[in-house]
Image (spheres, rainbow, N blue to C red):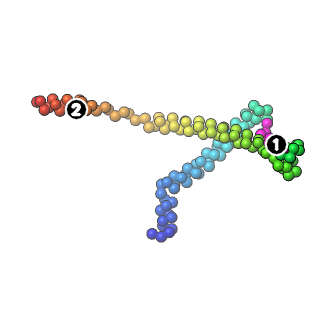
Amino acid sequence: MGFFSDFKASLMKGDVLSLATAVVIGGAFGKIVGSAVDDVIMPIVGLITGGIDFTQKFITLDGNSYADLAAAKTAGAAVITYGNLVQATINFVIISFFIFVVLRAAEKARKKEVVAPAAPAGPTQEELLTQIRDLLKK
C-alpha cells in the first residue's frame, strides 16, 4: 500500500471519524453554551453585582492611578488584571454547571432507553444437583 492509501485507511477508521464528529459537535455546543452564558446568565450576574465589569479591574505596579485599563495600558504601565481572572472563574463555574445539567439530562435519557427486562433467574447449583440426584435414584 502506498502512503496515500494508508492515510485514507487511517482517516476512515471509526476512531478518527468519531473524534472529528466530537470536535465539530463540541464546537457547536461551545457556541450554545457561550451564548447562554453571555446573553442569559451574565446579564443576571451583572444585575446582581450592580453592573460591575470585572474585566476592568486591575492593579498598577507603578503606583499611579488610571481611569481605566485602556488608559493604563496606553501609558505603558505594568498592570495585574485580576478582574480577568475573576471573570474567567465566573465563566468557568457557569459553563461547568451548564454542561453538568446537560450531561445529567442526557444520562437520565440514556438510562430510560437502556432499561432491559431482567433475565429470569435459573435454578441454583444446589437445585440442579438435587434434580440430578432424584433422577439417578429413579
Identify the residue at image location x=62%, y=48%.
Answer: 28
Q: Which residue is mark 2?
A: 128
- Separation of residues labelled 2 and 1 (CA atoms): 80 Å
Q: Is residue 97 left or right of residue 119?
A: right
Foreground residue among 25 and 96: 96
Q: Name the quadrant of the C terminus.
A: top left
Local SS, label 2: helix
Q: Is residue 4 above or below residue 56?
A: below
Q: Is residue 57 magenta?
A: yes
Q: Residue at x 59, y 51 (%)?
A: 24
Q: Which residues are magenta?
A: 52-60
Type of the residue with mark 2: Leu
Residue type at mark 1: give it.
Ile
Find numbered disc 1 in the image and state the secondary structure of the residue it sits on.
Answer: strand
Q: Nearer the viewer, residue 5 or 126?
A: 126
Camera-near label (2 vs 1) is: 1
Q: Which label number is shown at residue 105?
A: none
Residue 21: x and y, percent? 55, 52
Identify which residue is drawn at 17% across, 33% down: 132
Q: Is residue 58 left or right of residue 39?
A: right
Residue 36 visible within the image: no
Instruction: Give the percent coordinates (x, y) of residue 130.
Output: 20, 29
From this viewpoint, is residue 64 visible? yes
- Inspect the magenta stretch and tell me whether residue 130 lies in it: no
Residue 85, position as x, y percentages in the image: 73, 42
Q: Is residue 77 left or right of residue 84?
A: right
Question: How busy is the neighbourhood of tag 1: few (under 14 within 10 Å), some, or many (20 plus)?
Answer: some
- The disc at residue 59 is 1
Residue 60 vs residue 125, the one in the foreground: 60
